[in-house]
Image (cartoon, rainbow, N blue to C red):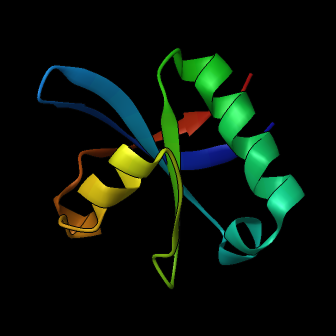
Amino acid sequence: MATCDVALIREQGINFAVVCVADHVINSSSSREEMVRAWTYELGVPVALIGARQHNTYGRRDIVNWLSSVHPGQLPWRRATLS
């Protein structure tokens, strides 16, 4: 089970989530794809990933573009665990 900080967002009528992961997850194509699939299934909304330290992003282009204009500290983070 993975535990991560997750922000559930509703922006311009679209629900999505941002999941904070270790930077090495973003840098590994297989790890990031697996995390996006798992969290999308768990949360039931599209997911983008953000690296914990370097704040690199990965996911749907529209979500990643939105994330580029928001400081991570502004997001409504909560701790969540994959079941």
State the image coordinates of residue 13 (x, y, percent, origin top left). Answer: 15, 20
Is residue 27 placed above or below 33 in the rendered structure?
below
Residue at image coords 66%, 18%:
41
Residue nearest the viewer, comparing 62 with 30: 62
Is residue 50 placed above or below 35 in the rendered structure?
below
Residue 71 is drawn in which quadrant?
bottom left
Residue nearest the viewer, comparing 82 with 60: 60
Is residue 65 placed above or below 2 in the rendered structure?
below
Q: In the displayed image of the protein, which residue is found farthest to the right?
A: 30
- Locate residue 66 relative to residue 26 in the image: left or right: left
State the image coordinates of residue 51 (x, y, percent, origin top left). Answer: 55, 70
State the image coordinates of residue 29 (x, y, percent, origin top left). Answer: 82, 61
- Locate residue 52 relative to residue 16 in the image: left or right: right
Q: In the displayed image of the protein, which residue is found farthest to the front?
A: 61
Residue at image coords 11%, 29%:
12
- Does any portion of residue 2 appear in the rendered image? no
- Does any portion of residue 21 appear in the rendered image? yes
Residue at image coords 25%, 23%:
14
Residue 49 is drawn in which quadrant?
bottom right
State the image coordinates of residue 43 (x, y, percent, origin top left). Answer: 53, 20
